[in-house]
Image (cartoon, helix red, strand yellow):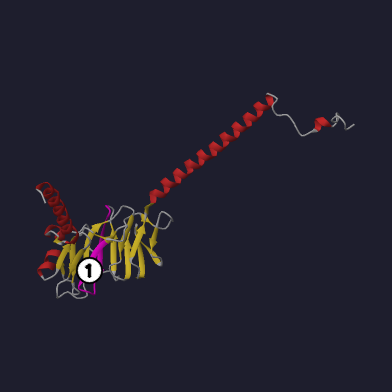
């Protein structure tokens, strides 16, 4: 092989190996990211297996009750694959109420690593039946995430968001209840066994905006029909003025029958 082909081959090998590192490699998350303060205190005392609070800035805070030593965090893409989710403000609370940060979790023998397809969290050996909390990103009016644990769920919507009016608001799976807590709605499932949950919600003013837009479209539609009807009537009147509307029903033959018929 001559040197003319060596450079392209080297580039291909470099791209392939770097791609493999991105696809299969695993790297630790920075201490600053793990130990940063959550946007609001985590809801540790909830009696559900998964408590998720959605915030107004398209983020969410999740608290999971774990009865196993590890968990993988990811989102599914449209092709059936997995993509890791960004996590920060990681905390673990022992059953006795002691809360440790993400770096302390590592120091006690646990691990938190991120790859292209998932974030893997392994709890310390002394962890048992505690709760894991973290903060991540969401979308402004729709939340969707795999069910990392089964059982009871609670999703707290941001203030003044609602799901009651379909199709602007809906949640899956079905069988949920909606509670009111001040200006917030809490969606509760007694038991979730599906692979994912999703909640689509709206601001109350969204309905007013949509209602106003629908009213404007209705007025425009009625006005257009009225204008079209008036145009047809004007054309008919014009034809009558020009004598174009002549009765051709056959009455002109009553007095003068055709030749050979009289």
Left or right: where does residue 232 sit relative to residue 74?
A: right
Please give the residue where the numbered disc 1 appears in the rendered image: 71
Q: Quadrant of residue 244?
A: top right
As displayed, is residue 155 above or below residue 258? below
Residue 125 quadrant: bottom left
- Which residue is located at x 14 percent, y 50 percent? 11
Please give left or right for residue 100 compared with residue 193 in the image.
left
Q: Residue at x 9, y 68 (%)?
A: 107
Q: Is residue 6 above or below residue 187?
A: above
**Which of the two residues, 186 or 197, is positioned nearer the viewer here?**
197
Q: Secondary structure at mark 1?
A: strand
| Part of the protein shown in magenta | 57-74
Q: Can residue 41 be seen in this snapshot?
A: no
Identify the residue at horizontal 52%, vertical 40% (top origin).
221
Asked if the stretch drawn in magenta spans residue 150, the answer is no
Q: Is residue 97 above or below residue 183?
A: below
Left/right placement of residue 21 relative to residue 211 reads left
Tell me the quadrant of the picture where the C terminus can be found: top right
| Residue 55 on image: x %, y % | 28, 56
**Is 118 or 176 nearer to us in this picture?**
118
Percent x, y of residue 48? 30, 70
Let me know if residue 63 is in the magenta part.
Answer: yes
Residues 48 and 193: in front is: 193
Q: Position of residue 246 (x, y in %)?
A: 73, 29
- For the residue carrying disc 1, how many other residues have a C-alpha within 10 Å: few (<14), some (14-19), or many (20+)? some
Q: Can you say whether 150 is above or below 254 in the image?
A: below
Location of residue 91 (image quadrant):
bottom left
Q: Is residue 19 visible?
A: yes
Picture residue at 19% right of the left edge, 76% below the top: 128
Residue furthest front in the image: 1
């Amino acid at each position: 092989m001559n040197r003319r082909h060596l450079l392209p081959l080297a580039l291909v090998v470099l791209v392939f190996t770097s791609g493999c590192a991105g696809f299969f490699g695993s790297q630790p998350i920075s201490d600053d990211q793990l130990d940063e303060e959550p946007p609001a205190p985590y809801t540790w005392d909830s009696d559900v297996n998964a408590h998720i609070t959605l915030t107004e800035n398209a983020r969410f805070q999740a608290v999971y009750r774990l009865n196993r030593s590890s968990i993988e965090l990811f989102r599914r893409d449209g092709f059936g694959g997995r993509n890791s989710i960004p996590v920060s403000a990681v905390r673990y609370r022992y059953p006795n109420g002691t809360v440790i940060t993400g770096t302390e979790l590592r120091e006690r023998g646990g691990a938190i690593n991120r790859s292209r397809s998932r974030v893997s969290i392994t709890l310390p050996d002394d962890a048992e039946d505690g709760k894991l909390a973290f903060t991540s990103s969401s979308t402004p009016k729709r939340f969707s995430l795999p069910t990392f644990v089964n059982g009871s769920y609670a999703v707290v919507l941001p203030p003044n968001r609602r799901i009651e009016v379909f199709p602007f608001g809906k949640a899956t799976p079905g069988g949920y209840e909606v509670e009111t807590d001040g200006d917030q709605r809490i969606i509760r499932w007694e038991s979730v066994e599906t692979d994912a949950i999703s909640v689509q919600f709206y601001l109350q003013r969204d309905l007013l905006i949509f209602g106003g837009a629908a009213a404007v479209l209705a007025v425009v539609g009625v006005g257009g029909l009225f204008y079209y009807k008036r145009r047809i009537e004007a054309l008919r009147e014009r034809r009558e003025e020009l004598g174009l509307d002549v009765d051709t029903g056959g009455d002109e033959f009553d007095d003068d029958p055709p030749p050979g018929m009289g």
